[in-house]
């Protein structure tokens, strides 16, 4: 795995320890998912001032953003494209996730164990979103 881009490193370094640790754990999961799905790696950047990951290979998946904010210091937020059904699917699959608006925002509490399976599943669905939709469309 490559070193994260400087703007990403600089931003995450300003976050509290629990948020940093959770973010680096998630980043590892994200890169593992990209490798498992042969997505050509992930583009890492800041989108709207938030860390964002997107498959390098075009037309494979969508962007997954993450954020910690002093306004909600007890949780780490994940954001998916609101034009997808990803948050709604996660709500059905993981009703125990503490924060999910069913549209674009999901979150986990930093004082609880990180739900790595759910986060990995979210990353998998996000990074392969267009591949899976095309495959489903060609089957029927």
Image (cartoon, rainbow, N blue to C red):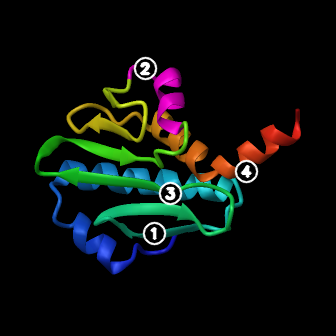
Q: Secondary structure at mark 1?
A: strand
The residue at the point 13 percent across, 44 percent down is: 73
Residues at marks 2 and 4, CA–CA distance in whole angstroms: 25 Å
The residue at the point 40 percent across, 33 percent down is: 115
Q: Secondary structure at mark 4?
A: helix
Q: Which residues are magenta?
A: 86-96
Name the residue that disc number 1 marks: 44
Between 62 and 8, the one lying in front of the other is 62
- Label placed on residue 63: 3
Between 111 and 43, the one lying in front of the other is 43
From the top left corner, tell me how far across and down residue 51 is, in percent.
Answer: 35, 62
Residues at marks 3 and 2, CA–CA distance in whole angstroms: 22 Å
From the top left corner, tell me how far across and down residue 76 is, in percent.
Answer: 27, 44
Q: Is residue 66 above or below residue 90?
A: below
Residues at marks 1 and 4, CA–CA distance in whole angstroms: 20 Å
Q: Secondary structure at mark 3?
A: loop
Tags 1 and 2 touching, CB below 8 Å: no
* Between discs 2 and 4, the one toward the N terminus: 2
Secondary structure, magenta segment, majority class = helix
Name the residue that disc number 4 marks: 131
Residues at marks 1 and 2, CA–CA distance in whole angstroms: 29 Å
* Quadrant position of the C terminus in the picture: top right
* Between discs 3 and 1, the one toward the N terminus: 1
From the top left corner, tell me how far across and down residue 38 is, in percent.
Answer: 71, 60
At label 3, counting other C-alpha atoms closer than 10 Å, the crowd grade (few under 14, some 14-19, many 20 or more) is some
Q: Nearer the viewer, mark 1 or mark 4?
A: 4
Describe residue 139's horizontal placement relative to residue 28 as left or right. right
At label 4, counting other C-alpha atoms closer than 10 Å, the crowd grade (few under 14, some 14-19, many 20 or more) is some
* Between discs 3 and 2, the one toward the N terminus: 3
- Label placed on residue 95: 2
Residues at marks 3 and 4, CA–CA distance in whole angstroms: 14 Å
């Amino acid at each position: 795995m490559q070193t994260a881009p400087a703007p990403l490193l600089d931003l995450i370094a300003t976050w509290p320890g629990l948020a940093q640790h959770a973010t680096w754990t998630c980043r590892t999961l994200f890169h593992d998912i990209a490798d498992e799905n042969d997505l050509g790696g992930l583009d890492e950047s800041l989108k709207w001032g938030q860390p964002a990951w997107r498959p390098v290979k075009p037309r494979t998946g969508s962007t997954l953003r993450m954020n910690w904010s002093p306004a909600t210091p007890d949780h780490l937020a994940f954001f998916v494209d609101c034009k997808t059904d990803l948050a709604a699917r996660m709500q059905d699959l993981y009703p125990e996730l503490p924060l999910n608006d069913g549209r674009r925002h999901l979150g986990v509490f930093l004082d609880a164990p990180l739900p790595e399976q759910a986060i990995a599943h979210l990353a998998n669905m996000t990074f392969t979103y267009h591949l899976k939709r095309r495959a489903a469309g060609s089957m029927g």
